[in-house]
Image: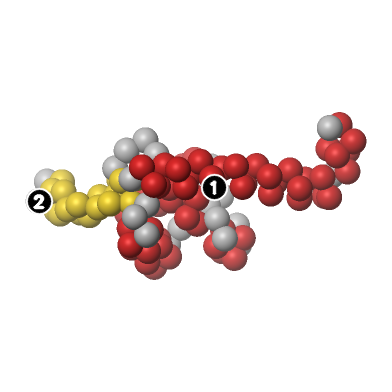
Amino acid sequence: MRTDAVRGHLDGLLLAALEAGPLHGYAIITTVQERSNGALELRKGTIYPALNRLERLGLLRSAWQAEGERRRRCYELTDAGRRTLADERTAWREFTAAIGSVLDPALREAT
């Protein structure tokens, strides 16, 4: 899938990946890839700046955690992040309905 197609939805993807609980960066990448059946492959160079920005905005918090001998920064949603995720989902549904009604006029006639 084209990177530019994902770019406008990256925040929502990251927030959704973290909804079930804290994850480190690679686990976030894996979660998005698995949920999309391999269609979405996020790169480290893309997600870490976004995670840092979401943390600065108060939508995420992070902490270092040890996994074996390795330390990883784990991210989790804040209450503001959960509210933003709900807003992202609403906006996504409205967007896909609008685009769908243009690309597939039969959808518009069904409503």
For the residue labelled by badge 2, is the local secondary structure a helix, a strand or a loop? loop
Q: Residue at x 83, y 37 (%)?
A: 107
**Would residue 107 appear left or right of 45 to someone viewing this image?**
right
Q: Nearer the viewer, residue 10 or 26?
A: 10
Q: Indicate which disc residue 69 carries.
A: 2
For the C terminus, give its image quadrant: top right
The quarter in which the N terminus is drawn is bottom right
Task: Tell me what residue is drawn at x 90 percent, y 36 percent.
Answer: 109
Label 1: how many Cα within 10 Å (few below 14, some 14–19, many 20+): some
Q: What residue type is disc 2 on? A: Glu
Element at label 1: helix
Q: Which mark is residue 46?
A: none
Expressed as whole percent of the image width and height from the top left, the position of residue 87 reads 54, 45
* Mark 2 vs mark 1: in front: 1
Q: Residues within 10 Å of mark 2 (few under 14, many from 20)?
A: few
Q: Is 107 situated left or right of 90 in this image?
A: right
Give whichever of discs 2 and 1 has the lower sequence position: 2
Horizontally, residue 17 falls left or right of residue 52, namely right
Residue visible at 47% across and 47% down in the picture: 84
* Residue 94 in view in this figure: yes
The answer to whether mark 2 and mark 1 are in CB contact below 8 A is no
Where does residue 105 sit, x and y in percent of width and height? Answer: 88, 43
Per the model, the C-alpha gap separating discs 2 and 1 is: 37 Å
Is 8 on the left-hand or right-hand side of 16?
Answer: right
Residue 3: x and y in percent read 56, 64
Q: Residue at x 86, y 39 (%)?
A: 108
Q: Which residue is mark 1?
A: 88
